[in-house]
Amino acid sequence: MREVTPEEGQKMVREGALLVDVREGHEFEEVHAEGAQLLALSEFEARYGELPQGRPLVMICRSGARSARAGQYLLDRGYTDVVNLAGGTLAWAESGLPTEGGKG
């Protein structure tokens, strides 16, 4: 699966991609990339069909491992435009990109 930098990921989102955060709800509430949509990995297999197939998807988690697994899961099920955000939310925040949440 292709990986993108936080800056590339943010550019994709500005151009219409959906940013999908696969962390659990409590992690998401603490801090998440601005504009991210939560679809927790614990519910992913049951709910992945809610994600649009005709729209680019940028997968994100804390550091990039869980989102890579989720993205590969989508690719294996016919999704074609899926990338993983290298370094995850940690890298996004360290790059100075906007975050939301209680501690963001």
Image: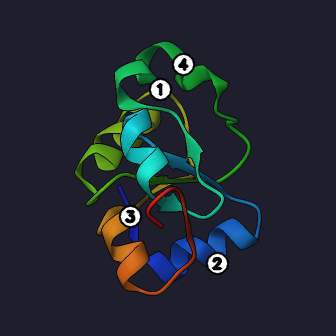
Left or right for 26, reference 14 = left
Instruction: Residue 10: give x, y in percent of width and height.
Output: 59, 74
Mark 1 burial class by Cα count in 10 Å: few <14, some 14-19, many 20+? few
Circle 4 residue: 47
80 vs 61, nearest the viewer: 61
For marks 1 and 2 on the same chain, the one whose residue lies earlier in the sequence? 2
Circle 2 residue: 11
For marks 4 and 2 on the same chain, the one whose residue lies earlier in the sequence? 2
Determine the CA span between mark 1 and mark 4: 13 Å
Circle 1 residue: 77
Q: Are marks 1 and 2 in contact (CB under 8 Å)?
A: no
**Which amino acid, mark 4?**
Arg
Determine the CA span between mark 4 and mark 2: 26 Å
Mark 3 burial class by Cα count in 10 Å: few <14, some 14-19, many 20+? many
Circle 3 residue: 89
Instruction: Residue 37: give x, y in percent of width and height.
Output: 60, 45
**Which residue is pictured at 32% across the width and 69% down the height?**
90
